[in-house]
Image (cartoon, rainbow, N blue to C red):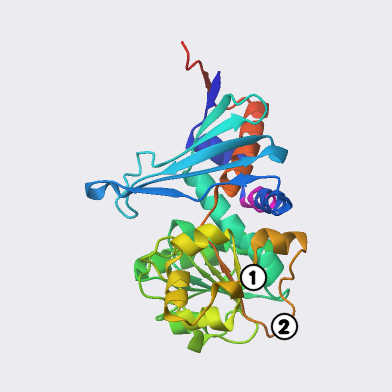
Amino acid sequence: MALVLTESDVKRVLNMRDGIRLVEEGFRHYASGRTTLAPRLVMKLEGDAGNFRIMAAIVPDMGGFGLKTLTGTPGKRDPASTYFAVLFFDVTSGALLAVLPGTHLTGIRTGAASGVATQFLARKDAKTLGLFGAGFQGRHQLAAIREVRPIERVKIFDVDPVAARELAETVSSAGLEAIVTSSPQETARGSDVLASATTAKEPPIRATWLEPGQHINAAGANAPFKREVDSETFARARVVVDFREQALQEAGDLIEALKTGAFDQNRIHAELGDVVTGARPGRETEDQITLFKSVGVAIEDVAVAAFVYERARAEGLGTDVDLQS
């Protein structure tokens, strides 16, 4: 029997606080060498179907292994259709345990990775967040960073001003000060933490706008043609990545910095797992500029899926399906 879950099932058992805890645990296991992580496989589809992406990981100490598939073109996905799906397997028997939709799961784990990075790299007194991108992922970035820092003010920039205003209304209703900015430069100015979750091809975050002590989460540029931070930002910052091999293959802004010679891959300070475990230091001075460059890794998906499966079983959620019948 395999447990088939719906998005409402996943949303019922998975929140951001648990997501941050689970993703941090997953990176700890990764740093210990007890996991197997494969770089993402990307295949181009025809028409508007976008890319077919497959990512997989084995995390024995969290009880399972699995893979996630992603399809579709951002902005063209039908809300009634499924484009993110996770298969979760038992690590001891190899049996398929669950089939999960991955939309909420992906939002949580992507935000959670930035939350973990912010916990270890941002100043403790960070109160102002500069948010680039007011869409689905941007909202999860905000939720995660609020979990780990005492955010009081959010400055929001989006190329769609309607989306920025809508998010500002949500932020204000949660008791925070919300400012819709007119430019990326205005967003960066005076912000303690910058978070970018966009599909930008030209970087909205530029080194000339940065201030001492800022921390940057750059989570959107996960393809070679995307850029969220300019090359000089890599040169100025202490750079931490989620998975070095995959970041060097996929992160368009990092690839551009290497190509122009502004940055050398040997200057990548650490992978996030090494910072989490203390094998490498995180922030060391109040004035240091830090950058978490993430492209998303399957360890995050498996760590969260293991938890969702256990909670769903405990609460009697989902439908058992005999796939062999």
The relative height of residue 274 versus residue 304 in the rendered view (above or below) is below
Secondary structure type for disc 2: loop
Percent across and percent down for residue 95 are 58, 24
The relative height of residue 298 versus residue 262 in the rendered view (above or below) is above
Percent across and percent down for residue 168 are 48, 68
- The quadrant the N terminus occupies is top right
Q: Is residue 293 visible?
A: yes
304 displayed left or right of 33: left
Q: Nearer the viewer, residue 77 or 279?
A: 279
Amino acid at the residue labelled 1: Ile
What secondary structure characterizes most of the magenta part?
Answer: helix
Q: CA distance from mark 2 to mark 1?
A: 17 Å
Percent across and percent down for residue 242 are 59, 60
Disc 2: which residue: 286
Amino acid at the residue labelled 2: Glu
Q: Is residue 153 visible?
A: no
163 displayed left or right of 243: left
Say which residue appears at 39% left-offset and 49% top-offset: 42
Dot 1: few (<14), some (14–19), or many (≥20) neighbours within 10 Å?
some
Disc 1: which residue: 151
Q: Is residue 248 part of the magenta span, yes or no?
A: no
Q: Which residues are magenta?
A: 16-21
Counting labels gives 2
Secondary structure type for disc 1: loop
